[in-house]
Amino acid sequence: MNIVGIIPARYASTRFPGKPLALIDGKPMIQHVCERVSRIASLSSVLVATDDQRIYDTVASFGGKAVMTSELHKSGTDRCGEVVKKLLEQGLHPDVVINIQGDEPFVEHTQIESLINCFNDSSVQIATLKKKITSQQELISPNVVKVITDLNNNALYFSRFPLPFQRGKEQDSWLENHTYYKHIGIYAYRTDILLKLTELRQSGLEISESLEQLRWLENGYEIRVAETDHENIAIDTPEDLLKLKNI
């Protein structure tokens, strides 16, 4: 399979403007992500999708490949879609696209490989990851997205609320009675499916939970969910960057 890794990276983050260019051990964050992902032999190529010339120039300076995209995209999925359209115009036809978070400088190669392995099943349209929840704090936090799956490991629902609800049991005992999973927000899509996703309008569930993957489920697309044991470290604020010194 021809598999392309795309790293969406925008400059105008509300909580951390210029985040992709923030230095970690003397290197821009986006360079850390690119270098780690570029070591994955299964990927045919790795591209940064950005809307800012400063990010584009930085990627070029360390030998990476970047593509300029619109400033109007509301999600990384849409930004990946624009890159794919440009690749198709150049006569390049990736089979699968991996959407890799640009603010997770320690992304683990095993996670990407788990996503790629999902596509050995020809029925898989979209793939993502989950990790077992082990703390009550994660379980009840609306900032930790939970996912429940069916017996075939396809997503049934994503929510900021802990699902399933356990009737007749106190919430602080829920982890003792059921295994809960949080969603790890790395996506992979077959190319034709990705292009269709970018044409969908926002849905009611998506608006309620502020989760774009609910739009896909509401429109009948299946999302295969693989499990990972690796804990991702996302950098959302300047304070998160300072915490790295303790890791």
Image: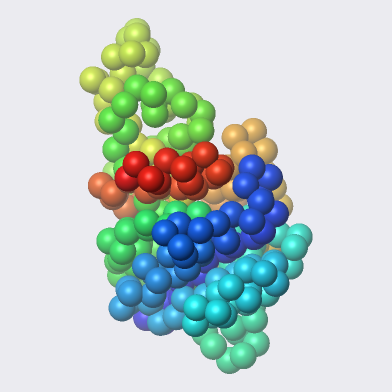
Residue 210 placement (x, y as % from top left): 62, 39
Question: In the image, is residue 53 above or below residue 219?
Answer: below
What quarter of the picture does the N terminus occupy?
A: bottom left
Q: Say left or right for 138 vs 197.
A: left
Instruction: Tell me, yes or no, if residue 126 can be seen here.
Output: no
Q: Which of 210/232 is in front?
A: 232
Instruction: Tell me, yes or no, if residue 42 can be seen here.
Output: yes
- What residue is rendered at 57% in x and 61% in y? 21
Q: Which of 231/43 is in front?
A: 231
Q: Quadrant of residue 125?
A: bottom left
Q: Residue furthest front?
A: 26
Residue 209 placement (x, y as % from top left): 59, 35
- What residue is rendered at 34% in x and 9% in y? 170
Q: Residue furthest right?
A: 72
Residue 188 placement (x, y as % from top left): 45, 63
What quarter of the picture does the C terminus occupy?
A: top left
Residue 216 placement (x, y as % from top left): 56, 51
Question: In the image, is residue 33 above or below residue 152?
Answer: below
